[in-house]
Image: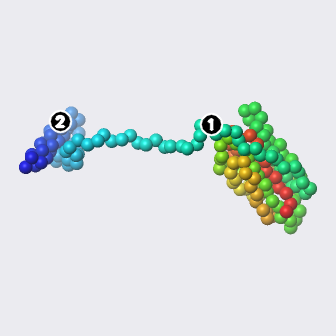
Amino acid sequence: MRQRVAEGTVRALAILLLGAACMASAAGCTSEPPAVTERLSPGPAPSPATPEVSLTPIDPGPPPVVTVPAPVAGEVARVVVTKQGAGKAFRNVPGVPVAEGRTYTVEVACAAGRPSSGTSYAVYDAAPGTWGHGEPLYSRPFTCDGAVQRTVHLGLPAGKVQIDVRGLPGDAVTAYALIRPE
């Protein structure tokens, strides 16, 4: 009985509030009272949304050490990137032309304060007048985490090519990409 009286009281209050709201706004009112779906007994206050948690340390420590390998006979191209002040210095080193029918290995590595997966390398045609123009002949993403990564058995068109790295993280200190014969 008490619950029925309480529900009736809540319904009557809802009708009164609806009427007051209709009189105040004078728009969008109906004669039907709204359905009462509120809890009759007070409950715990809703908790605020949980913030996204990152387990990345604030001070990641020193970046891994990446050692750029020495050139080898038959190397096709290389790029070495080093931190220089607030920016980066790119040094492109051309090599010998790609030999027809031969396969190559691309070796890349990158060191930064925090690992990053937005880095990639791209191989371009290096014919005169093509630097920075056109689509890459081949490209592939790699992780900037200090590890040496290789793409093997890569066939390239005969002639000169160049290699570049893209998407280096802002805190990258060293990166390189090179193409060597297998």
> In front: 18, or 143?
143
Q: Quadrant of residue 43?
A: top left
Q: Residue furthest bottom?
A: 101
In this rendered view, identify the residue nearer to me: 95 or 150: 150
**Which amino acid is tagged 2?**
Ala
Tell me the residue at 74%/55% (across/down): 149
Query: Which type of secondary structure does the marked residue at label 1 adopt?
Result: loop
Report how far apart the C-alphas of labels 2 and 1 lie in the structure: 58 Å
Q: Earlier in the sequence, mark 2 or mark 1?
A: 2
| Identity, as a three-letter code, of the amino acid under mark 1 | Asp
- Residue at image coords 59%, 37%: 58
The residue indicated by pointer 1 is: 59
> Which residue appears at 83% of the width and 61% of the height?
104
Q: Which residue is at the front of the view, 39 or 160?
A: 39
Please give the residue where the numbered disc 2 appears in the rendered image.
Answer: 20
Residue 178 drawn above or below residue 12: below
Residue 2 relative to residue 128: left or right: left
In the rendered view, does 19 fall on the left or right side of 181? left
